[in-house]
């Protein structure tokens, strides 16, 4: 009987966490969402992203060193601030394993990991696809919520990446777009976004459906 493949099996994760938070005026990833379940300490925007990844999955965070509830490996793009495509490339190079798939997440999208199993499933169903990317009901595909085949991502991160957007990584790749819930793509860019994320986090702690 074939062995059942679990949803995150064969994956590693790169989290982009090096943005300058211009609209917030401070490090938005360190903002508190809610207490972590079973703890008394603060649970930050970045902690929420990391908590959505299973403990046995390798995670590399690209950005400045921060205190996080979950221990992670941290790296930086060279030079720092050279854009999301360069950040993904740095994260891929910092991985210690050889995963089948690489999950790319934004450090300011606390509920993004909830959409990852659907992305992985879509990529596994389509042998011709190189990357599965999430798209919310009312917006375009989100390149920082995507799952790549490792070999395809390795090819696309070997060229000139400085100051290029994340969507440039999908140039010349076969892309499958996966519809996801709106809350999966909620990113914290403004104080209003942060309050929406806090409401969603409180709802999740109460076991309610999230509606950001």
Image (spheres, grey):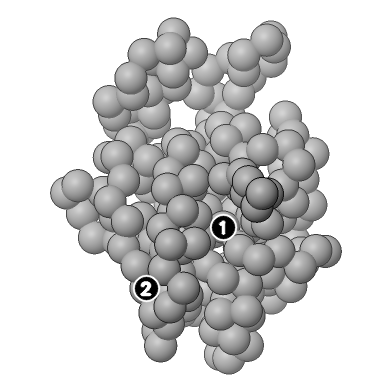
The image quadrant where one finds the C terminus is top left
Spatial distance from mark 2 to mark 1, Cα to Cα?
Answer: 14 Å
Going 46% across and 73% down the picture, which residue do you hit? 127
Q: At which x and y percent is residue 179?
A: 28, 51
Q: Do residues under tags 2 and 1 come within 8 Å of each other at their CB atoms?
A: no
Going 76% across and 42% down the picture, which residue do you hit? 56
Q: Secondary structure at mark 1?
A: strand
Q: Indicate left or right for 66 with 207 as reference.
A: right
Q: At which x and y percent is residue 106?
A: 50, 52
Q: At which x and y percent is residue 199?
A: 36, 19
Q: Indicate left or right for 114 with 23 as reference.
A: right
Q: Secondary structure at mark 2?
A: strand
What is the number of callouts on the image?
2
In the image shown, does 134 or 67 lie closer to the viewer?
Answer: 134
Q: Earlier in the sequence, mark 2 or mark 1?
A: 1
**Which residue reaches farthest bottom?**
159
Determine which residue is flagged by label 1: 103
Residue 59 to residue 160: above or below: above
Going 69% across and 11% down the picture, which residue do you hit? 39
Residue 158 to residue 93: above or below: below
Pointer 1 local density, CA inside 10 Å: few below 14, some 14–19, many at least 20: many
Pointer 2 local density, CA inside 10 Å: few below 14, some 14–19, many at least 20: some
Dot label at residue 71: none
Q: At which x and y percent is residue 120?
A: 49, 55
Q: Is residue 19 visible in the rendered structure shown here?
A: no
Q: Indicate left or right for 201 with 49 as reference.
A: left
In the image shown, does 172 or 89 lie closer to the viewer?
Answer: 172
Q: Is residue 54 visible in the rendered structure shown here?
A: yes
Determine which residue is flagged by label 2: 175
Q: Indicate left or right for 73 with 81 as reference.
A: right
């Amino acid at each position: 009987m074939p062995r059942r493949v679990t949803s995150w099996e064969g994956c590693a994760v790169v989290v982009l966490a090096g943005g300058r938070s211009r609209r917030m005026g401070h490090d938005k990833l360190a903002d508190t969402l809610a207490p972590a379940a079973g703890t008394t300490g603060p649970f930050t925007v970045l902690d929420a992203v990391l908590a959505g990844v299973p403990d046995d999955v390798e995670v590399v965070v690209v950005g400045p060193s921060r205190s996080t509830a979950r221990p992670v490996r941290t790296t930086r793009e060279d030079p720092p601030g050279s854009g999301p495509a360069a950040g993904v490339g740095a994260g891929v190079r910092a991985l210690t394993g050889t995963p089948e798939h690489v999950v790319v997440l934004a450090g300011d999208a606390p509920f993004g990991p909830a959409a990852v199993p659907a992305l992985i499933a879509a990529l596994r169903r389509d042998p011709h696809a190189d990357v599965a990317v999430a798209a919310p009901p009312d917006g375009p595909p989100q390149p920082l919520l995507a799952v790549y085949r490792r070999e395809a991502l390795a090819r696309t991160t070997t060229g000139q990446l400085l100051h290029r957007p994340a969507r440039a990584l999908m140039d010349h790749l076969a892309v499958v777009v996966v519809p996801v819930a709106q809350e999966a793509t909620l990113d914290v860019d403004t104080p209003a976004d942060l309050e929406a994320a806090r409401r969603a986090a409180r709802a999740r702690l109460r076991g309610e459906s999230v509606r950001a």
